Amino acid sequence: MASAAVACGLPVEDPAFFYFDPHDDLDSPDVNENGYLDAMGLPMLRGESWKTLMKTVPGSPARGYDRFLYCGLRDQSGPQRQRVIEAGMRSIWGNDERKVDFVDELQTELGQGSYSPALVHLDLDVLDSSYGKVNAYPSPGGLFESELVQCLGIVPTKTHPTSLTVCSFDPHAGDGDKIARIGIRAILAFAESLLTTGAWQPDGSN
């Protein structure tokens, strides 16, 4: 829901979306099974659900999924996975049976499409569950710490990010200090890459 709000508030008409997330956030009320509102953020942006409510939000025209890329998506039911495919969204899928080279696949994907300007969404439970509990929804087959740091550093070299939203971190879930350190490393890699590429200046000139 935080990323949906950011997308509405940005002065960008048609942003691309990078979602580092094991969950698709693509449920609509008619398919959702648990009433979890955070799972419905993207259909709200697309104008598929909560339509009357979304009309009251300034800056919320319906957005498409033609420039949308997930990285680490994996914790889904069969129907949820199919919904992502049918929507035409790109994904670098996580896998708990074989190790995915997320860094290499992200570089390949970014070289094949146009993803600028981009809204970047980092849900820290994209990390592999071997790092402990980020929140109540850990899952195997995700990114290792080094991969997350590298991937966040790559994004500004291939596109023009307009925002970075970091979400779904519960410091009381059990491994808060460890996850916080990893999250800070990833955020710093993203910021340092922005500065190196000139995509952002600390004086706000761009």
Image (spheres, helix red, strand yellow):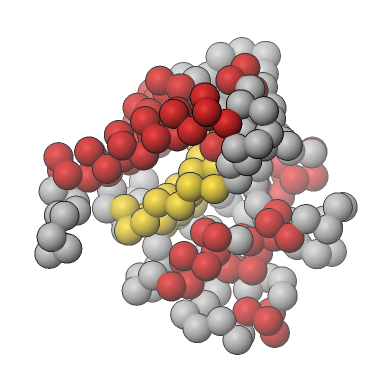
Q: Quadrant of the C terminus?
A: bottom left
Q: Is residue 185 left or right of residue 64?
A: left
Count of marks placed on residues: 0
Q: Give percent across and percent down for residue 27.
A: 73, 56
* Residue furthest top as drawn: 98
Q: Is residue 4 left or right of residue 108?
A: right
Where is residue 87, by image quadrant?
A: bottom right
Residue ID at (58%, 41%): 169
> How far from the left and from the top, in percent, is residue 140?
67, 22
Counting from the top left corner in percent of width and height, residue 33 is at 87, 52
**Of 91 and 193, the residue lying toward us:** 193
Pick the front one: 182 or 77:
182
Task: Give the residue at x 80% y 64%.
Answer: 29
Residue at 61% x, 85% y is 55
Examine the rendered structure and indicate whether residue 62 appears above or below residue 40.
below
Q: Quadrant of the N terminus?
A: bottom right
Q: Along the line of sight, which residue is nearer the eye, 95 or 171?
A: 171
Report whether residue 141 is seen: no
The residue under the point 84% across, 64% down is 30
Q: Is residue 182 visible?
A: yes
* Residue 155 locus on image (x, y percent): 32, 40
111 left or right of 202?
Answer: right
Left or right of 127? Residue 185 is left
